[in-house]
Image (tube, rainbow, N blue to C red):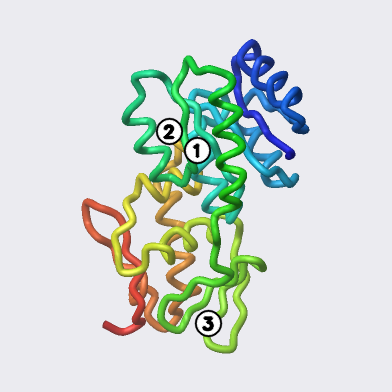
Amino acid sequence: MNVLIIEDDKRIGHVIQQGLAEDGHQVHTAHDGAVGLSLIESNHFDVAVLDVMLPALDGFSVLSQARSRGFAIPILLLTARDGKADIVRGLDLGADDYLTKPFQLEVLLARVRAVARRGPISQPSTLRAGHCVLERSRRLLVRGDQEITLTKKEFILLELMMRRVNNVVTRDQLIEAGWGFDADVREGSLEFYIHSLRVKLSPGDPTAMIRTMRGLGYMLTAQEHA
């Protein structure tokens, strides 16, 4: 198997790397989240071992952005011993399994083999909301017979809302998917992209499909006219 380790503690990373190599796997390493996410996007890995506490981009942001961009690689999350909240959050964001530190190497190797056997998470090729279809492979919005180009961030935000059509998506969830956890997002940035998506989804009535839920976030509706 081809395994990616994203771990900033070089001592722990070396132990994991050595154990995986002795278990017969090819191993690649990254010591911060930004590099790790870039490797996920540009290479094929069978499994990723992802630490939560990382510089540049934390593990939650790597996980959230990888999933929102359609990467179905099985991910084993490494958390602190008392990180129950981290475990819940990681699983909700799309981690396949978790392991708390400190851990026994034999257990980690078994968990890696287990998540690899499950295979990648099944991802639909298209998402639909009313008359609009999001083609994930081409990162393209199709409205009726018209194909509409999306920017990278528009695609990430729209995909998240289409996955939760007719449900509220909070501002924090949108910002985390589009910019990363704890990102310093300039005032009005999210609103700029929401407005752009509204026009592309329903140019005749820009507020028809994406509704502002005051104090909460936004909701993409399946019907253009409610």
x then y, percent, for residue 182: 43, 33
Q: Name the side, left or right, on which 46 lies relative to 145.
A: right
Given this view, does label 1 or label 3 mark the residue nearer the observer? Answer: 1
Residue 82, quarter of the rendered image: top left
Q: Name the side, left or right, on which 180 lies relative to 188.
A: right
For disc 2, the neighbor class at 10 Å (few under 14, some 14 to 19, many from 20) is few
Amino acid on which disc 1 is placed: Ser
Can you identify the residue that label 1 sits on? 61
Can you identify the residue that label 2 sits on? 182
Mark closest to the chain's N terminus, 2 or 3: 3
The N terminus appears in which quarter of the rendering? top right
Asked whether the beta carbons under mark 2 and mark 3 sit within 8 Å of each other, the answer is no
Q: Image height check: is 29 above or below 139?
A: above
Amino acid on which disc 2 is placed: Asp
Q: Which of 98 and 182 is in front in this view?
A: 98
Q: Name the side, left or right, on which 127 lies relative to 166.
A: right
User: Which disc, if any, is residue 124?
Assistant: none
Mark closest to the chain's N terminus, 1 or 3: 1
Asked whether the beta carbons under mark 2 and mark 1 sit within 8 Å of each other, the answer is yes
Q: Image height check: is 109 above or below 222?
A: above
Q: Which residue is drawn at 52% across and 77% down?
A: 133
On the question of residue 61 being in view, the answer is yes
Q: Name the side, left or right, on which 44 lies relative to 183.
A: right
Can you identify the residue that label 3 sits on? 143
For disc 3, the neighbor class at 10 Å (few under 14, some 14 to 19, many from 20) is some
x then y, percent, for residue 64: 49, 44
